[in-house]
Image (spheres, rainbow, N blue to C red):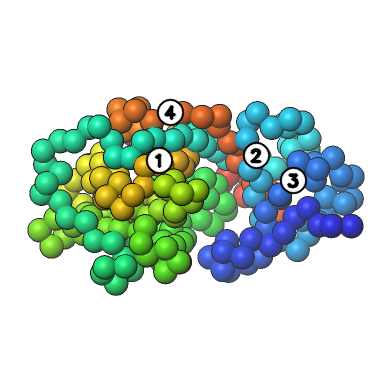
Amino acid sequence: MTSLVRKHDFNTRWWGEPAGIVDSLDFFQCSRASQTAELEPYSWVEFKAPAESPGLDLRAINQAGFFQVDTQINYRLKLPSAMRPGNLDSLEVEFADQSDFRVSADDIQSFRFERYFKLPGATEERVNLRYAQWSNEQIEACPSTCLRVVSNGRVEGWYLGEAVQGTGLHLTLAMLGRESEISGLLLFLKAYEAFASRGHRLGWAAFSVMNSPVHNIYAAIGARFLAPTGCWLWVRDRSPEAVAEIS
C-alpha cells in the first residue's frame, strides 16, 4: 500500500525532528489504525487543501487529530503594478545573479502571522531561522528571480520568486529587513517593477488570512483573489500543556 504521509525534507531539516506532509484527502478515509501507523514516524505533520476540494470533510480531518492553523488566500496580479509612487526611484534592486547575497535569520522582521507558531516549542528565532534557510535555498536554486532592495547602502528587504509557465512568476516570499525604513508596499512595488524588467508579466502566490496589512497591499495594487487553501497540523505530543500552548 502506498503511503499517504511522506517525509517533508525541508521541515525535517529545519525542525530537527521528522516532519511529514499528507498529500491526499484519501488519508482521512483510512481506518484509525492505518492513520496512526502512518503518523507514527513523525513529530508533526501538515495537511493543506483548497477550500473547494471535492470530498473535503472537516470532521474527518479533526477526528484524525489535525487542527486548523491557517487559511491562505491565493491571488494573482499583473506585473508591474500600475501604482508607482515617486519614491521608488530612490530604491535600488540587486538580483542574486548579479550580487552574491544570503539572508540571515537575525536580519529579517518577525513573521507575526506564521502558522508554524502553532507548533509547541516554536519561537520567533526558530521560525525566522526556517525562513532564512528557505530563502537561501531559493536564492541558490533561482538566482535570476530572487532580489534584494537597497537604499543608501542598507538592505531594506528581499523578494524571492520562481519562474514558471513562460512569463509567469511564483512570488515565493517577501521579507522586510529588521532595520528597514520603507513600507511593505514600496518593497512589493519595487520588486514587481524589477521582475517585469526581466520579462515576467503575471505573478501569483498566497498569504495568511490573518495578515491584514498584506491583504490591504494586494487589494490596493489590484490583485485578483482566488479560492483559499486550508492548513492543518497534527502534533505528536498533544498533552494538556501542548494543547494549551497551541490554543
Could you say whether the residue bearing mark 4 is in a helix, strand or loop? strand
Task: Pick the quarter of the image with the C terminus.
Answer: top right
- Ranked by sequence position, the earlier of labels 3 and 4 is 3
Query: As drawn, is 230 to the left or to the right of 141?
Result: right
Sequence-wise first label, 2 or 3 = 3
Whether residue 166 can be seen here: yes
Q: CA distance from mark 3 to mark 4?
A: 27 Å
3D distance between C-alphas at marks 2 and 4: 20 Å
Please name the residue shown 55% across and 38% down the image.
Answer: 70
Looking at the rendered structure, the kind of residue marked 1 is Leu
The residue singled out by tag 2 in the image is: 49
Mark 1 highlights which residue?
Answer: 202
Question: Could you classify mark 3 by the number of other residues whose Cα lies within 10 Å: few (under 14), some (14-19), or many (20 or more)?
Answer: few
Q: Which residue is mark 4?
A: 224
Label 3: which secondary element: loop
* Amino acid type of the residue tagged 2 in the rendering: Ala
Instruction: Say what amino acid the circle numbered 4 marks.
Output: Arg
Up-down relation of residue 4 to residue 48 (above or below): below
- Horizontal side of residue 59 vs 74, given as left or right: right
Q: Secondary structure at mark 2?
A: strand
Determine which quarter of the picture holds residue 244: top right
Earlier along the polypeptide chain: callout 3 or callout 1? 3
In the visual, does 72 lie left or right of 37? left
The label nearer to you, 2 versus 4, is: 4
Compare marks 2 and 4 and give the one earlier in the sequence. Answer: 2
Q: Position of residue 207 (x, y in %)?
A: 45, 39
* Alpha carbon distance from label 4 to label 1: 11 Å
Circle nearer the N terminus (4, 1): 1
Query: Which residue corresponds to the image point at 63% horizontal and 35% vertical from the top-left?
Result: 50
Mark 4 residue crowding within 10 angstroms, few (<14) / some (14–19) / many (20+):
few
Disc nearest the viewer among 2 and 1: 1
